Image: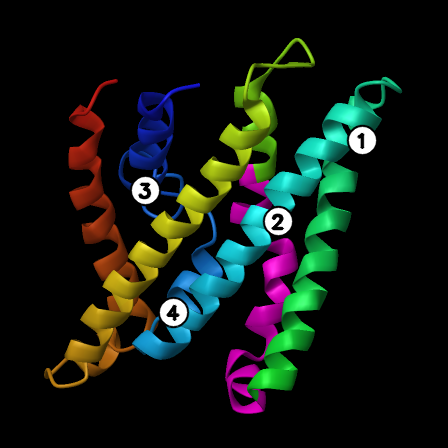
Amino acid sequence: MNIAQFLTIFISSVFIYNVILSRFLGLCPFLAISKESKPALAMSLAVTFVIVMSSMITWVIYRFLLVPFNITYLRTIFFILVIATFVQLVEMVIRKISPAMYRFFGIYLALITTNCAVLGVAVMNIDMFFVKNKAVAGSFYFSLFQGFSVGVGFTLAMLLMSGIRERLEFCDVPESLRNFPIAFIIASIMSLAFMGFNGFRF
């Protein structure tokens, strides 16, 4: 392990293969919660927490349970159970700390359970840092850091989108393009912009 490997993971996860703008995972909260910066940041922190904790727990489960008992084909089921557990924890914390924020999120907070970005990172960690069901050196730390980096990329995309949509409130947007239509157009332009990072090679 060296700093260059962690730097590669960070740049790849945040910019080159951004989970929202390049991999197109987690679009539900991206479009629904990005109208204002504060809720977008809160949702991003919740998703980042779930991704990091899920990356840690799913690595342990895969390494010490699924591989030894030769039941790796059940990884998706196990991973979803882990994700659902942490989403419930986050939901209870937000409801206790900020009932108003909890009401604002509504169903989208519970939808973190089925957020394909969270499950996608857990599966990606296994595919990248296990070779023939054997963990590569430092794979636990790589998985944990990749989960955090994906969360940073998710947060970046959410804050960029919420900033743009807040500015649009002061613009004369045609009726037919308000809300989701203009959000899809902005998301596609942002995605095209992030494609420029594909020129980076490590």
Which label sits on residue 53?
Answer: 2
Q: What residue is at 32 percent from the left and 26 percent from the top?
A: 8
Disc 3 to disc 2, how far (Cα)? 18 Å
Circle 3 residue: 14
Q: Depth check: 58 or 74 in front?
A: 58
Q: Is residue 79 left or right of residue 35?
A: right
Q: Is residue 11 left or right of residue 81?
A: left
Give neighbour class at mark 1: few <14, some 14-19, many 20+ (Cα, 10 Å).
few
Give the mark nearer the N terminus: 2 vs 4. 4
For the view shown, which residue lies furthest in the bottom direction?
A: 100
Disc 2 to disc 4, how far (Cα)? 18 Å
x%, y% of residue 172? 10, 84
Instruction: Say which element carries label 4.
Output: helix
Q: Is residue 152 left or right of residue 172?
A: right
Which label sits on residue 41?
Answer: 4
Q: Which residues are magenta?
A: 99-121
Disc 2 to disc 1, how far (Cα)? 19 Å
The reply to whether the C-beta atoms of the residues labelled 2 and 1 are less than 8 Å apart is no
Circle 1 residue: 74
Disc 4 to disc 1, how far (Cα)? 33 Å
